[in-house]
Amino acid sequence: MESFFRTHSYLVEHVHAPVRRALMDEINWDDRLIGIKGSRGVGKTAFLLSYARENFRDEEHKCLYINMNNFYFQGHSISEFAKEFYDYGGRVLLIDQIFKDPNWSQELRRCYDTLPGLKIVFTGSSVMRLKEENPELGGIAKSYNLRGFSFREYLNLKTGLNLKPHSLDEIIRNHGQIAAEICHKVNPLDHFQAYTHHGYYPFFLERRNFSENLVKTMNMMIEVDILLIKQIELKYLSKIKQLLYLLAVDRTQAPNVSQLAADIQTSRATVTNYIKYLADARLINVLYRLGESSPKKAARIMMHNPNLMHAILPQQVSEQEESETFFQNALWGRHIVNVGKRSYDFAVGGRLHFRVLSEAPKRQLAGIHYAMNGIRRGDEHQIPLWLFGFLY
């Protein structure tokens, strides 16, 4: 046990987390079983360690971080280790990469039932289904999604400011004043292009080539998160990667599942499943028409965030596609985003209509909000595109 505490102390002391993530204040930390899901590379490990440093720095043996990659857990169960930790005086166990244990859900349930004084916070892949596939955790595990850096978090990191988030309703009602207050402190346009290229994933802070690192991370998302968790044979790996590339190339149109099936030489049902897995891995977002959802036919498939576009097709990213991808990613997770009709690009929450533009419209249509790229401040219905990056 002491070796685990030594590792924990070292990692907590050396964790590099220069920005406090918004999710830290959204979680109900009184719950006994908390799951933090997120795609590879968004900073789940740093999030756990930051929580430990912020709350248990003076209570070393009450909180412990462990990683399921440790070979110790090839011979010992989670519940066995948790009992030993609890008897040692521990009260908060942080478990990273929980899905590496094939019996993780049963083990967590056993801990919950037998150690009522123990809190467990665990991280897992976004591909995991906590409740749908693990009924033993239903009603006891509270699940949260950790996303990549918002533009607000990125801006705070680059400037040292402490700019606060705003709700969508606040931005629509009061975007003029909000933008004025922010622009008084910093010009967001000085940082926006860099963010869309490399600001979503925290590992841009590392001294490595970001694009190469992101491509490596994307491959890990498919090879580990999708193949391992969904138990797909390795021989199908190339088909999933080929499908992702084809979706990235043809991202402005509704997917033709029959053509995609022919292109990667598999069935339509398999393509549909692969699209779902890629969306779960946060590599793509699947958008439907207003009033429709899965299993209806997707109206459009977009990359999950602009950084991915630059990694796959660095020379073929148009400003309009980048702007639309930023917009839908900024709202994803908290708002339902649907493909709009001819007069607007997106419907948000079934009630708000948006167009994403780089130039002022020749005629402003009633009931349409315009997310405008390239402007610092807007007017009544023209909202700076960058401001949607302040939703979290």
Image (spheres, rainbow, N blue to C red):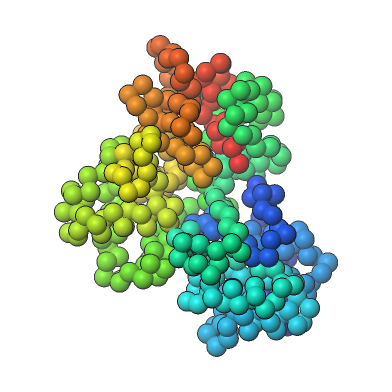
Most extreme residue toward the bottom, as rendered?
Answer: 75
* Residue 192 percent across, percent down from the top left: 53, 35
Q: Where 85 sits versus 63, above or below?
A: below
- Residue at 60% of width from left, 59% of height from top? 142
Q: Quadrant of the N terminus?
A: bottom right
* Residue 263 percent across, percent down from the top left: 18, 53
Most extreme residue toward the top, as rendered?
Answer: 363
The answer to whether one can see residue 98 in this image is yes
* Residue 25 percent across, percent down from the top left: 70, 49
Q: Is residue 215 left or right of residue 237?
A: right
Q: Is residue 177 left or right of residue 56?
A: left
Residue 297 picture quarter: top left
Q: Is residue 387 left or right of residue 31?
A: left
Q: Is residue 336 left or right of residue 274?
A: right
Residue 51 picture quarter: bottom right
- Residue at 57% of width from left, 47% of height from top? 149
Q: Where 315 sits versus 39, above or below?
A: above
Residue 254 picture quarter: top left
- Residue at 68% of width from left, 71% of height from top? 93
Q: Where 375 sits versus 60, above or below?
A: above
The answer to whether one can see residue 11 in this image is no
Observer-nearest of 197 and 289: 289
